Amino acid sequence: MNATRMISFVIPVLNEQDSLEPLYEAVTRSVESLASAYEMIFIDDGSTDRSIAVLQELYARDREHVRVIQFRRNFGKTAALAAGFAHARGEVVVTLDADLQDDPAELPKLLAKLEEGYDLVGAWRVDRQDPISKRWPSRLANATVSALTGIRLHDLNCGFKVYRREVVQDLKLYGELHRYIPVLAHWKGYRIAEVPVTHHPRRFGRSKYGLQRLVRSYIDFLSVLFLTTYLKRPMHLFGTLGSLFALVGAVIMIYLAALWVIEGGIGWRPLLFFGITALVVGIQLISVGLLGEMLRHTTFRADEEYSIRQVWDDHQGG
Ligand code: UDP
Ligand code: MG
């Protein structure tokens, strides 16, 4: 690791009063030999315990390295990360959960991988210390996502990740999309890798995510799939599906019309209902696709159509 680089730690905090002090110590211990400059940005995401008081103490003790951002209320982990990213000054950004489950002592491994030429390196909790109710759904989700997106990662949603600065600046995070950061980054062409790390059980406080997380992450996955595939060409999805339905519907109706002319009276055949439904659904889908294209057209921004790694141009100003 190039020692002149600055590292920014981005740490979202919701009711983690007892973990913050040991976390601060552990991060300080691990980073001192790794970078000449670093900052720890703590984002207090509407904590109702003593977290903000502890953070203020840390700030008073170490103003050079500690920064604290306090939200007015709980906006969620995605918002906390986005705020941290917006404030980060380092060339390398490290995200870390505040609950001590990830071990900052593993940082050198992740940084070494980044140095190999990756843009984002995630921690892979090989022996994850969380309840089964969390591990199995997560395993299923990781397998599904990697099958559908082509990203070969075992652990997408670990809070411990290191990024090159340009990645976090290039991410549009809202809702609860932090779970799919690697998918969004991969889609933009960033190089992604992961490194196995040790994982610890939660020592203080409790997990902020219960079962509703399952439903939400499924819905978010649908959004992410759409965002990374058809957002930029809605007609390819809706137009194709819609035309298929409409075609099937039209063929059926023509067939029934012919039957009606030849034999007279087609009655209430199930096929009639199917034909009508297919036609209507097809036309609806095409209309939705057209609306999508109109939105796409009016919100078009040339600089969001691609993501540039580097430019060689002798005539560029500077
Ligand atoms: N967190 C947050 N805002 C929230 C929920 C969680 O900032 O609305 C933080 C939390 O303090 C922790 C990290 O996000 O630092 C991960 O949360 P948690 O450990 O509860 O999730 P789990 O590891 O159980 O999935
Ligand atoms: Mg945790």
Image (cartoon, rainbow, N blue to C red):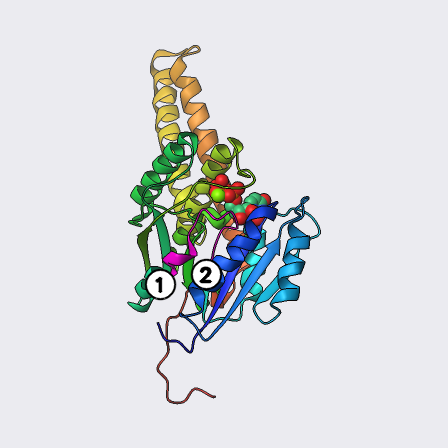
The picture quadrant where one finds residue 204 is top right
Identify the residue at image location x=58%, y=50%: 13
* Residue 39, x across and y down, in percent: 53, 67
* 65 versus 127 height, above or below: below
| Quarter of the N terminus within the rendering | bottom left
Q: For the residue marked with disc 2, what is the amino acid?
A: Val
The percent coordinates of residue 71 (x first, y second) are: 67, 53
Q: Amino acid at mark 1?
A: Pro
Mark 1 residue element: helix
The quadrant in which residue 49 appears is top right
Q: Nearer the viewer, residue 62 or 302?
A: 62
Give the total of numbered labels: 2
Q: Residue at x 39, y 49 (%)?
A: 229
* Residue of label 1: 108
Query: Dot 2, crowdedness within 10 Å: few (<14), some or many (≥20)?
Result: many
Q: Is residue 232 above or below residue 112?
A: above
Instruction: Name the side, left or right, on which 96 lies relative to 129.
Output: right
Q: Residue at x 55, y 57 (%)?
A: 82
- Asked whether residue 76 appears in the rendered view, the answer is no
Q: Which residue was labeled with disc 2? A: 94
Instruction: Please report the bounds of the magenta region as a residue range.
Output: 94-108
**Residue 66 or residue 72, whichever sits in front:** 66
Instruction: Indicate which disc, 1 or 2, sits on the residue closer to the N terminus.
Output: 2
Residue at 62 percent across and 61 percent down: it is 58
